[in-house]
Amino acid sequence: MTEHDLGRRDVLRAGAGLAAATLVFGDWTPAQAAALPKRKLGRTGLNVTTITAGTVRCTDRRVIDHAIDRGINLIHTCPGYTGGRAMSVVGQVMRNKRSQVFLVLKAEPFNIDGYLRTLNTDHVDILIPEMQITDVAAKNTDRYRDGFAALKRAGKVRYSGFACHTGMTSVLPAAAAKGWWDVILLRYNAGCRSSLLSHVSSCVNAHHMGILAMKTTEGLNTGNATAFQAGLRSLLGNPGISSLTIGMAALQHVDSAVGAVTTRDASGDREFERSAGGLGDGCTFCGECAPACPQGIALDDYLRAWQYRRRGDGELAEELAGGIPRRHSLALCDGCGKCNDACRQQVDVAGRVRSLA
């Protein structure tokens, strides 16, 4: 990271945090920091590492410390992760290491002062409220634009962005056309990347937006380190993707992600590409099933909850499904099957959703 990258922040203290060899956590000794590859994040000009430390399941400050010591300079957090514990541990680390990283906060652009206090900082670099296909009209508005503008003037937020899990082929062009969104955090993995290539290219090349990827490990074989790391490298084969957000809840998660971008395994990469067509569970989160439901059930959210539970995040799945308003809940399902009819991937949408009941 350079002095230009930091902008309004203090210049890095010489050598701070880049050598991890002297840190010992219990009987586990971290590896030396690596020179991680970086990419420009669109019009922001931020030079970010190709790996972002995601905190969706993180409750241990040592993980964040270790990620920074290994060279990762982008941290993503949210008030709702692990009931607020994730943001709290990030804030603990920020007391001493704020100048070494860029912070991405998933929250609405209103009343963020409490979040800043928790994070022990006076600003975040990128603020990203969620924007799904169902609320494009509500969030591509003057209110949101003005909300971000006010935060930028106050020095509390540097760049505006949004996170999108579903209906991305519709959401991305609609947002890009507005011209004031700086960054997109989108669902991007081996199962859905082919449908997004042209949209990512347009956002980057025509609109100069920065693209961060999330849900990047879906469909990857986490039990095979070679295949897992080859899958991550494959996603970075798209130069429009600046950084992959990897959930890091343990020290080993950090090292695995770092290893993916600091090593090369040509045979592993070829093997991954040969098998990539069979990855995933069929759902690309295109968003076409939800509009087909005559009852207005929040199918996108239920499908996300289904995937959370499938990968073992039962608590996160319950939190998401439990927060769906009754007017969009499963209680309204009459079994018409129109969601299944609308699915181009022939996924049993109704079956997955009902399994959450």
Image (cartoon, grey):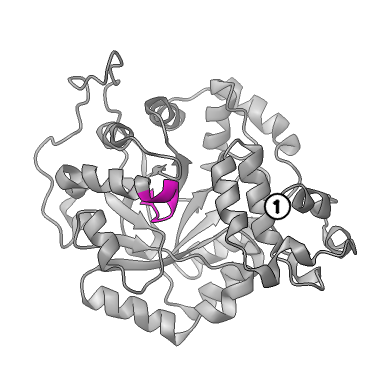
Q: Quadrant of residue 268?
A: top right
Q: Position of residue 282 (x, y in %)?
A: 76, 45
Q: Say what amino acid the circle numbered 1 marks.
A: Thr
Identify residue for label 1.
Answer: 284
The reply to whether residue 93 is visible in this rendering is yes
Q: Which residues are magenta?
A: 75-84
Compared across the picture, whether 312 is left or right of 306 comes to left
Q: Is residue 193 left or right of residue 117?
A: right
**Magenta stretch containing residue 77, yes or no?**
yes
Provide residue 209's location: percent of width, then percent of height.
Answer: 44, 65
Q: Residue 271 vs residue 115: left or right?
A: right
Residue 193 seen: no
In the foreground, 311 or 220? 311
Above or below: residue 230 compared with residue 224: below
Q: Where's residue 141, x and y in %? A: 48, 84
Residue at the limit of the structure toward the bottom, as seen here: 142
